[in-house]
Image: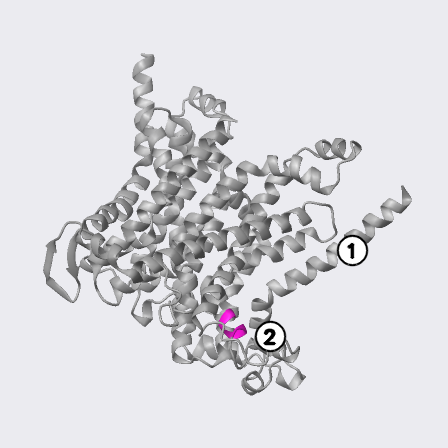
Amino acid sequence: MKDNRIIIKINNVVIYVVFAVILLVLLLPLISMFGTAIKTHDAALTTVSLFPEKLADLSFENFGYVMLKVGFGKNMLNSVIVSIAVTLACIFCAAPAGYAISRYHGPYFRVYSVFLLLLQMFPIMLMLMPQYLIFTKLRITNSLLSVIISYTTSNLAFSIWLLKGFYDSIPIELEQAAMVDGCSKFRAYVRVVFPLTLPGIATVSVFTMLNAWNEYTVASVFLKKESAMTMTLGLQKFVQQNGADWPSLMAAACIATIPAILFVLFSQKYLIEGMTAGAVKG
Amino acid sequence: MKKKRKIESNRLGYLMTIPATLLILLVDIYPLMNGVTLSLQKYNLQHPKNRRFIGLENYANLFQDSEFLGVLGYTFFYTFVTVITAYLFGLILALIMNRKMPGRGIYRTLALLPWAVAPSVANVCWRLLFNDRVGLVNIFLMKTGLIEEPILFLAKGEIAKLTVIFTDFWRDFPFMMIVLLAAMSSIPKDLYESAYIDGAGFWSSFRYITMPMIKGVSAISTILMFIWVFNRFDNIYLLTGGGPNKATYTLPIMSYFTAFMRGDMGKASAMAVVMLIVMTIVAIIYLRVMKSEVEQ
């Protein structure tokens, strides 16, 4: 019995170590990103190490350079505006719809929820081309509004489904009690049920925000003007203009990654909940 | 009285779906139908006056075009390999993490990062790592003597075809890991204990307890991922731009270039409709699996 335990312990240590090595290799892109970003310009172009070799090679000048001189700050600001607007719009539309398909029954609501599932499977390209023609006619390309509308819609199906799950878990007796006390059904929803689904709202927010922050494809079609570009586009523009300026590029990439890392650190619970709820991220 | 009340309350239900429905109809469904009609037209943005209905000619042209058929084939290859490798690796990680070990939370957090990082960021990092002169991967391989010449990960067709699959795999395995881990942790522990007492080793308890219990989740998550990867545009576009010499063209990339660089909306829409047909087949399978899961 005791031998067995030792073997298990050794086994555990081996797995632990192997696992740590695997993860280290997998995170190499992010590690080298950070390592290159904190090198001085000369060191980054002449040395090949992962991190600055000497203290003299260490510098944070790249961060200031991309934020102030290259206009990457503006891109970041655009991304922040888009992410927040999309999240609010998405909750505004998805919360009542999720409630509706959770509480009401009948052919309309059944078909509606299956339809939402299928919606996620439509090829984005098929919608993007006519969307581009329509948005051009409406003169809203090159404005943040175009991507806000597009992102909100593409996040709806997932958000509605996720919130439906949360509403399902709230006993209907709560609303009935509120209605007995004289609330209308809608008031009961707003005052009693909605506050109870705040964890669901948090999960939806975390997801839509991350999706909007990271999105590239739609933005690249709609936003051609520099002043309207989001973070993902700004990064690509930077690549095209200063291809081999690796340290500045990596500094920009670092700044762009901070929100994602913060999200993983602080909202992991919500992220995992969303992913396992048949998550949608395309 | 009771009936009237029900009608009233259902009306609120309809009303509550209105904002979402309006957006979906205007921003998804209307353009989608538009796309399908575009695919039946000759319509080039550079010659907008020549726009006319040509029936299925775009499709006929596509299926005689060997380049398109090649791209269709590679799209399937790309998708299958990405999904299968992401699933297998996610499964291995989930198996390792499904046991008590110190620092499990930190490991899980770190393993989630590739999924959470923006593809535009990740692919900039890959470009640096895979660079032939300053890229660490080539430098490492040359220092250890495994290769003499740097490998052109992104500039050589056959290799680039695999490189883009690798970066997509890198982005997708965390999802599989998390989903499978959740499924595994819901398996009752006493099942394993009684199997252990009966003398079952790791493999037999994996085969007869774990696998059957995560079968449903595996099916659904691989189908979903198939859909995402098949439709995916940014990974390849950001890494190779479809190059070198169109070697890494997939259907989304090809239709993007056809539409937005050459302005041939008709042909590009026809390609997208072909994708829609593939997706429809996958969707039918998905709904079947979902239904059988619910019934179980």
Q: Is residue B278 visible?
A: yes
Q: Main secondary structure of the magenta part?
A: helix
> Mark 2 against mark 1, which lies toward the viewer?
1
Which residue is found at the position 38% from the left and 40% from the top? B283
Residue B246 locus on image (x, y percent): 35, 68
Q: Residue furthest right?
A: A2
Which residue is found at the position 41% from the left and 75% from the top? A238
Within-10-Å neighbours for mark 2: few <14, some 14–19, many 20+: many
Q: Residue furthest top?
A: B1
**Left or right, residue B5 beside residue B39:** right
Callout count = 2
In the image, which residues are magenta? Answer: B126-130
Dot label at residue A13: 1
The one of A258 and B57 positioned closer to us in this rendering: B57
Within-10-Å neighbours for mark 1: few <14, some 14–19, many 20+: some
Q: Is residue A131 visible?
A: no
Against A254, residue B56 (above or below) is above
Residue B25 locus on image (x, y percent): 26, 43
Dot label at residue A35: 2
The one of A25 and A133 positioned closer to us in this rendering: A25
Against B249, residue B130 (above or below) is below
User: Was residue B3 drawn as part of the magenta stretch in this picture?
Assistant: no
* Chain letter of disc 1 in the image: A
Residue B263 locus on image (x, y percent): 21, 64
Against A31, residue A139 (above or below) is above
Pointer 2 or 1: first along the chain: 1
* Chain letter of disc 2 in the image: A
Rendering quarter of residue B106: bottom right
Rendering quarter of residue A215: bottom left
